[in-house]
Amino acid sequence: MSARIGIVTFPGSLDDRDAQRAVRLSGAEPVALWHRSQDLADVQAIVLPGGFSYGDYLRPGAIAAISPIMTAVIEAAGRGMPVLGICNGFQILVESRLLPGGLIRNSHQQFIRRDQRLRVENTATAWTNRFTTGEEITIPLKNGDGGYIADAETLLEIEGEGLVTFRYSGVNPNGSLNDIAGLRNHAGNVVGLMPHPEHAVEAGFGPDTPAAMRSGLDGLRLFQSAIADITANVL
């Protein structure tokens, strides 16, 4: 039986269907979840997708963080369920305090869209176990509020505990401190990142690579990692 991975839709979500497609291409069953429900429909992992939940009012992710479904997501994360936050989903994770720090307006004050090189910093998570530490990958990036911030003490903890999962490589596109592009929690089941792995899952639609245009598939391995984690825990 296929792993069941839920994708939450909030008002203003833009990439929920893309995340569903990525889950399907990875070999799992995507399950649509609605923000007003607390029923997780027996899923085994959860994706909080990109977009502009609630129009980014107050702060990006701030209102979504108190949506009814987030009560269930926070409880499930506490039990060890894999949870992935992509872009706006990352913002929701930090607003929910499932991950430390915060995300603010890009340092250049502009929305950015580019194929972004990342360095994989930590593979001991439910979402990165199919990568190699130090590996460089390319994932599409698109955000206006992607600058990662944290106070000095929190940064020391993040670095000291090995909580950085991805760093920007080649160029820091938004002014994130320590080039941080993605984080994990201490347990390794919750991961958030600003780039969009769901846009690098199918040949012909991904980033350009030296092999061919639009051939990048690096994002697929995040979802395959979750399936491997689910399977290992079931067995």
Image (spheres, rainbow, N blue to C red):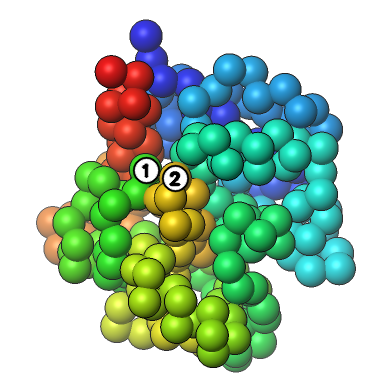
Judge from the rendering whether residue 188 lies leftward or rightward of residue 119; answer left or right.
right
Residue positioned 44% across, 45% down in the render: 189
Residue contact between numbered discs 1 and 2, judged by CB atoms under 8 Å: yes
Q: Quadrant of the C terminus?
A: top left
Residue placed farthest to the right in the image? 58
The spot of residue 232 in percent (x, y) is 28, 27
Quadrant in the picture for residue 46: top right
Closer to the camera, 203 or 104? Answer: 104
Residue 225 x/y as whole percent: 31, 39
SS state under label 2: loop
Q: Is residue 220 above or below residue 65?
A: above
N-terminal-most mark, 1 or 2: 1
Q: Position of residue 120 (x, y in %)?
A: 27, 64
| Residue 84 showing in the rendered view | yes
Q: Name which residue lies at 61% across and 55% down.
A: 98
Which mark is drawn over residue 126?
A: 1
Can residue 196 be seen?
no
The reply, left or right, for residue 59 in relation to residue 119 is right
Q: Residues within 10 Å of mark 1 (few under 14, many from 20)?
A: many
Q: Residue at x 60, y 90 (%)?
A: 108
Mark 2 highlights which residue?
A: 189
Could you say which quadrant of the image residue 1 lies in? Answer: top left
Place residue 7 in its image quadrant.
Answer: top right
